[in-house]
Amino acid sequence: MNVRPTIAITCGEPAGIGPEIALRAAWELRAKTRSVLIGDSAFLSMTAGDIDPAIRLVALSPQAVRNSGLPHLSVEQIAVIDVPLAAPVAPGRLDARNGRAVLQTLDLAIEGALAGWFDAIVTAPLQKSTINDAGVPFTGHTEYLAEKTGTPQVVMMLAGGTPLLRVALATTHLALKDVPAAITFDSLSRTIDIVHTDLRRKFGLPNPRILVTGLNPHAGEGGYLGREEIDVITPVLQAAQAKGIDVAGPYPADTLFQPKYLERADCVLAMYHDQGLPVLKYASFGHGVNITLGLPIIRTSVDHGTALDLAAAGLGRADHGSMIEAINVAAQMAATSSRTP
């Protein structure tokens, strides 16, 4: 891996804050990270000029990178792989005509990471509705990355706060009514294996300790409030423990997130999206990092959305702290992965 890790940054929804926070973070971290932006180079150059005239962007075509690789640029230059938009950008206003270009930036990042152009990818927030309105069914970054890399199962994990809190999810973007059926012995077993493996390989934790929530209030209260803990979750944990994985639970989610438990944990595995993430986001919003575990590549992202209202109000109102953290975590994961067999 390069001394300065090469990180691809997709700029996300052009009408949102993604382009601004990507530019600000890439420029701020230029001495320690070789960032490669993926987006409309003309639009990014115009935005960069409004942010700081000192920012120097060098536009590259995707085909030139495929043919010759990434050029060697000075620390004071940032490469942009050009993906032209189909329509002009009005900050704060979505335009479905740009949906396919947004998706193309993600495709290029995945291609480059698999081909070795990049050590990791970081994604700015996109607007799912814009891509769907462009005629492409799209659930979210996590599911799309799994599909495009041929990964049967991935795990969403967010990290942030002081002290550091990591929360992984057994299910992601599902309606609440569909969650119980999705928590099966096989899927939950694979989730625990993925979390354990990536905490070791990509975070350098030799024997990570994972605490697992129950699904139901009070973790089912002995079956009176649901049997998923008895029928599925506990047998999965027993099987994982038999393989040598340091996992414990199921704990009631309303009492697990307190220091006496968390100080002994490297990660909490929650059963569904809004069970674990409100706690994590309360502790770290604006500086948290979204991480996709189980992929053959490294991917992190910000912990927030497109913030169309901030984009409409003009540059300088968006906080790029989460993007800074996402790039730093991606670089650390890349360095750890290069050292861990």
Image (cartoon, rainbow, N blue to C red):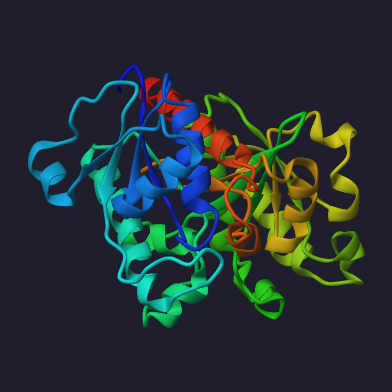
Judge left or right: residue 58 versus residue 210.
left
Q: Residue at x 46, y 50 (%)?
A: 19
Q: Residue at x 50, y 35 (%)?
A: 25
As rendered, which of 244 and 68 lies closer to the eye?
Answer: 68
Q: Residue furthest left?
A: 67
Q: Residue at x 67, y 39 (%)?
A: 287
As rendered, which of 136 and 296 lies closer to the eye?
Answer: 136
Q: Is residue 297 visible?
A: yes
Residue 116: give x, y in percent of width and height: 24, 37
Q: Is residue 149 visible?
A: no
Judge left or right: residue 99 versus residue 285.
left
Residue 37: give x, y in percent of width and height: 35, 43
Judge left or right: residue 26 versus residue 97.
right
Quadrant assignment for the C terminus: top left
As rendered, which of 108 and 218 lies closer to the eye?
Answer: 108
Residue 302: give x, y in percent of width and height: 57, 47
Q: Residue at x 80, y 49 (%)?
A: 279
Q: Is residue 207 above or below residue 267?
A: above
The number of discs equals 0
The answer to which quarter of the image holds residue 32 is top left
Quadrant assignment for the N terminus: top left
Q: Is residue 8 above or below residue 264?
A: below
